């Protein structure tokens, strides 16, 4: 087999080096773009309302109730969380010693006998108020997944909370919700439905590691390009 002329070999070498330089230039531009992003304000953050409602939903994950898991979050006028709660048994009543059944042939094994509210175990709203970390919750806002029942509405009014932000009103047709709204209206407590911008907010515990900005390559022009690309050309790409 005849050997390729030296001109052909040089041409192949030239194109190979050009492709290599092009890849390095692309990588450099990508790194520079990441660097530019971390030097400006992050745009994908959640707003205050999403944060508070997400906190209520996260609190609901603590509930042991097999039928309904509801969380609540109380926020003051400075956007500081002053109370968090979820539906569960009263303090001192162990979750494993009291019943969770909605209906039972044994009247004493019905969960509604051991609750503060009439329709469920200690409701999230009530627990959030009882667990508050401030002297009072006057003029605060309550974020809750489900519209408060009539029993919780009484406590909300008495506590001085001025606004209720709820996610779902699926029990709007039921008498305890109708009574709740009647009392809230009479007491001047505002309520409105939360309209989320995002359908879901994902919490990834591993994100704190792979999102470490210290893993970015140091001085890419020096380490990655090895002098094969003109720095001025890189600047024009940015």
Image (spheres, helix red, strand yellow):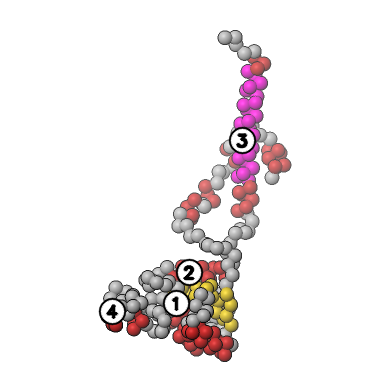
Residue shown at the point (45%, 57%) measured from the top left: 205
The span picked out in magenta is 9-32
Residue bearing the label numbered 3 = 23
Mark 1 to mark 2: distance in Å?
11 Å
Residue 112 is at least partly visible in this image: yes
* First reached walking from the N terminus: tag 2 or tag 3: 3
Q: Quadrant of residue 45?
A: bottom right
* Image mark count: 4
Percent position of residue 68, x then y: 42, 72
Percent position of residue 55, x then y: 49, 69
Percent position of residue 167, x then y: 53, 72
Residue bearing the label numbered 2 = 57
* First reached walking from the N terminus: tag 1 or tag 2: 2
Percent position of residue 194, x then y: 57, 72
* First reached walking from the N terminus: tag 4 or tag 2: 2
Q: Would residue 29 be counted in the magenta stretch?
A: yes
């Amino acid at each position: 087999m005849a050997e390729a002329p030296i001109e052909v070999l040089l041409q192949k070498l030239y194109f190979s080096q050009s492709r290599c330089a092009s890849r390095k230039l692309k990588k450099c531009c990508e790194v520079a773009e990441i660097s530019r992003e971390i030097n400006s304000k992050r745009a994908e953050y959640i707003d205050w309302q999403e944060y508070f409602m997400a906190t209520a939903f996260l609190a609901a994950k603590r509930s042991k109730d097999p039928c309904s898991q509801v969380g609540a979050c109380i926020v003051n006028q400075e956007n500081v969380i002053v109370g968090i709660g979820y539906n569960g048994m009263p303090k001192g009543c162990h979750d494993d010693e009291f019943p969770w059944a909605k209906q039972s042939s044994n009247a004493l094994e019905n969960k509604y006998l051991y609750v503060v509210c009439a329709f469920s175990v200690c409701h999230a709203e009530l627990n959030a108020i009882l667990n508050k970390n401030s002297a009072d919750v006057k003029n605060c806002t309550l974020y809750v997944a489900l519209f408060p029942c009539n029993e919780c509405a009484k406590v909300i009014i008495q506590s001085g909370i001025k606004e209720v932000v709820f996610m779902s009103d699926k029990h709007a047709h039921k008498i305890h919700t109708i009574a709740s709204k009647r009392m809230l209206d009479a007491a001047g407590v505002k309520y409105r439905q939360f309209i989320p911008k995002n359908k879901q907010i994902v919490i990834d515990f591993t994100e704190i590691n792979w999102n470490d900005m210290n893993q970015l390559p140091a001085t890419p022009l020096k380490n990655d390009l090895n002098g094969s690309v003109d720095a001025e050309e890189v600047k024009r790409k940015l």
